[in-house]
Amino acid sequence: MIGADLVAKILKSEGVDFMGVIPFNSLEEAGAKAGIRPLIFRQERVGVNLADGYSRITNGRKTGVFAMQAGPGAENAFAGVATAYADSVPILLLPASNPRSRHGVHPTFRPSDTYSTVTKWSSSIPTTSDIPAMLRRAFTQLRTGRPGPVLLELPSDILRSELSDDIPTDYAVVNGTRSSGDLQDIKLAAKMLLGAQRPIIQAGQGVLYAGGSTSEKLQKLAELTGVPVMTSMAGKSAFPETHPLSLGTRSSSTTDMVVHFLDKCDLIFGIGTSFTRIHHGMDKFDDKTLVQITNCSDDLNKDYDVDHAVLGDAELVLESLISEIEQLLDSRSETQKFDFTDEIHEVRQDWMKEWSPLLESGETPINPYRVIHELSLNTDPRQTIVTHDSGSPRDQIIPFYQAVNPNGFIAWGKSTQLGYSLGLAMGARMAEPTKLCVNLIGDYGFGMVGLDVETCVREDIPILTIILNNSAMGIYRPHNFPTANDLYGTKYTDGNYAQVAEAMGCYNERIDNPELVGAAIQRCASVVESGKPAVLEVMTKEEPNMPHRMF
């Protein structure tokens, strides 16, 4: 047995069934012998993105893994890792590196050093005998506290060296730990929630990662108190957006309900959220009373002065919080349950009346909001996982696509790499092979990663990719670079991406009539259901209107 075999054996014991890899790492062969399927990509960051999507949909219960070759492979994966770090996604990265004798010798690239700024934990295996201990530390980091990418560098001489008889190969599987929060902190949080005049709840990604029945408990809390719920971008789908108490998602563009209630509220009750200030996140928190429930102490008072905090797992804290609130309500002659449902309904009605002309538009080139509307009408949200790309697709779909069940939508945006959505949808399909997994991507984003639709064909990962092709970087307005655009056409691109998909062996359609979009989505979904990936290219207009876009 060589070092790579021991690594693979441990990964298998930790429940790893596949890993993304671009040869050569030594783990593709060792993993295959151990029953771990190697997935081969055309570009490293797409493989990282797949691991990311897989971990999100499994709530970190199963870990997405990507193994890079030494040098260029490890160098090329950085963008995917940085985005996973920004969104706190637990993925395991196993880059090979040069033999230990070359460490510190120019120009040797050390992933454990370079990636330390975009990983939760980054280290290197120092000796062959340390393989079990270092992997145990890696999985402990993956399953404890706030999630994030974890990197363990594998020197090539360790991977290829024979194990001596005195090296222990036994390994105990790592179990994660959770905190239930301090009961006195929970009691005060309950009193503050019921004592506010116009509170709102912000549900974050921590609600999803807590798993189990956490989303159901969140819904019970909202109904028990009557408090409206908005989600963060990463928390979208943690609360059903068809619910009468749903305000939608607080994002770079957002709903009228979020803006209306965020402006008027006096207390924001954060559950499973970091309260991170981002440049396009509707950050109207500074004059509010803030209560924060998080499993990571680094989140406390990070960007905002938090008035009260509970440090613990979202599911466990919610259980105690609901019990405490039930007692408080029962002990009072006049309950403090709020009633905002009519107000939410009225704001939602007015908002939808304003935007219906775009969502139902018959104009050509096709309005992108029509595509989003048709996607909602022609798919079952309970059997579908949707994600978006950066820029216009994100800002157009997040406010209007209603997620109804946990992990039915993957929203992201603390980092904004173009092309991210393709790998996310692939990872979602690996995690949920019976669901329709859809990524909405712009032409520019597809141009960066589109050849990996061939990976979908070759590796039997059937997803639906919808390209919004407006032949431009539509997110940018004329004032961003007027001279460069006037003289050199800087923002404009071109291409027939359906033909690219065809060349890659993928089912494809190209649509330029708005009345045909719905039927095309149905046909492509049927193709995916039959086990083949599909690409639908829709010729769209540049649509500058986005609800409450902040920048």
Image (tube, rainbow, N blue to C red):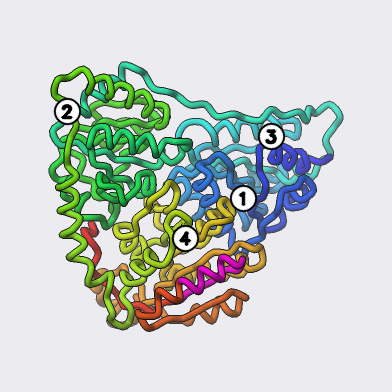
Q: Quadrant of the N terminus?
A: top right
Q: Please tell me which of labels 3 and 4 falls first in the chain.
A: 3
Secondary structure at badge 4 equals helix
Q: Please tell me which of labels 3 and 2 falls first in the chain.
A: 3
Q: State the image coordinates of residue 430 (x, y, percent, origin top left).
A: 59, 54
User: In the rendered view, does 547 fall on the left or right side of 166?
Assistant: left
Whether tag 4 and tag 1 are in contact, CB under 8 A, the answer is: no
Kind of residue at disc 1: Phe
Q: Name the residue at 36% across, 23% down.
A: 320
User: In the rendered view, does 344 fall on the left or right side of 275?
Assistant: left
Q: Which mark is residue 126?
A: 3
Q: Can see residue 77? A: no
Kind of residue at disc 4: Ser
Q: Which residue is mark 1?
A: 66
Cα distance in 3D space between marks 3 and 4: 36 Å
Kind of residue at disc 2: Gln
Q: Can see residue 67? A: yes
Q: Please tell me which of labels 4 and 1 falls first in the chain.
A: 1
Cα distance in 3D space between marks 2 and 4: 43 Å
Kind of residue at disc 3: Pro
Secondary structure at badge 3 equals loop
Which image quadrant is residue 10 in? top right
Q: Which residue is mark 4?
A: 421
Q: Please tell me which of labels 2 and 4 falls first in the chain.
A: 2
The crowding category of the residue bearing disc 2, from other C-alpha atoms within 10 Å (few below 14, some 14 to 19, many at least 20), is: some
Q: Please tell me which of labels 3 and 1 falls first in the chain.
A: 1
Of badges 3 and 1, the one in the foreground is: 1
Read off the magenta span: 522-537
Of badges 4 and 1, the one in the foreground is: 4
Of badges 2 and 4, the one in the foreground is: 2
Q: Nearer the viewer, residue 190 or 45?
A: 190
